[in-house]
Image (spheres, grey):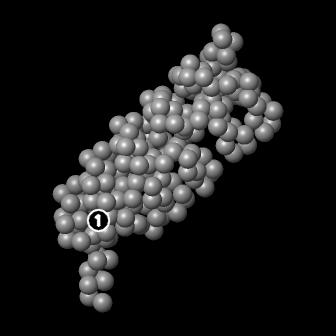
Amino acid sequence: MAQSATNLNLNAQLLVAARHGDLNAVERALSQGAVPNSRNRLGKTPLLMASEKGNLALAEIMLKAGADVNQASLERVTPLMAASYGGHVVLARLLLDAGARTEPIDQMKKPAIIYAAGLGHVEVIALLLDRGVAINAAYENDLTALMWAAGQGQAGAVKLLLQRGANPDLRDARGMTAAQIAGKASHASVVALFDAR
């Protein structure tokens, strides 16, 4: 029982250290027996926290310690989704090299590429496409990455997706194309990219 209490305390120390980005305290907790896949009340692991903050050094420590690269939070957010959301391309590459899967969706029914597209993280989009994500895959409401980028006014992301072969003629569940979605949202510069094709 004492050992169990000690482990729980070490796991808590690890989570607090990870939340604060205290690498020395993280390594100390791990060396004393903290579990790399420890989770807080939201189900977040230290690796997920590192991915949210773009803390590459912390992510490297956790992966070396055996952290599960695909362990999701209670909201089903994976480290790769978090890194994609934040535009942390180097960290996203590290996660992919460690075996991160690109296909999981969170409770909002979005995968990593949708977050990258909607927020205009061009380098992350390119990385995910290079790692095999289907450019025309449709998710919730038949929305593609191109539609998300267009609807959010992310001209750079739209340009990249079109250059990489995204189909602008696909329609969402409402029957709208990416250009129409951009137009409805008053993103004239994005509409112009479609008109210029």
Foreground residue, 137 or 92?
A: 137
| Quadrant in which residue 164 is drawn | top right
Q: Is residue 152 visible?
A: no
Q: Give the residue at x 51% y 32%.
A: 129
Left-right relation of 129 to 7? right
| Quadrant in which residue 9 is drawn | bottom left
Q: Give the residue at x 36% y 48%.
A: 98
Q: Give the residue at x 35% y 59%.
A: 67
**Secondary structure beneath label 1:** helix
Furthest-top residue in view?
A: 196
Q: Position of residue 118 (x, y in %)?
A: 57, 35
Check disc 1 and give the amino acid type: Leu
| Quadrant into which the C terminus falls | top right
Q: Position of residue 112 (x, y in %)?
A: 52, 43
Q: Position of residue 176 (x, y in %)?
A: 78, 30
Q: Circle 1 is placed at which residue position?
A: 14
Furthest-right residue in view?
A: 175
Local crowd size for mark 1, using a 10 Å CA cut-off: few (<14), some (14–19), many (≥20): many
**Up-down relation of residue 16 to residue 52 (above or below):** below
**Up-down relation of residue 188 to residue 128 (above or below):** above
What is the total number of numbered labels drawn onto the structure image? 1
Q: Position of residue 76 (x, y in %)?
A: 54, 57
| Quadrant into which the N terminus falls | bottom left
Left-right relation of 55 to 156? left
Foreground residue, 99 or 56?
A: 99
Left-right relation of 176 to 106? right
Q: Give the residue at x 75% y 35%.
A: 172
Q: Is residue 31 visible?
A: yes
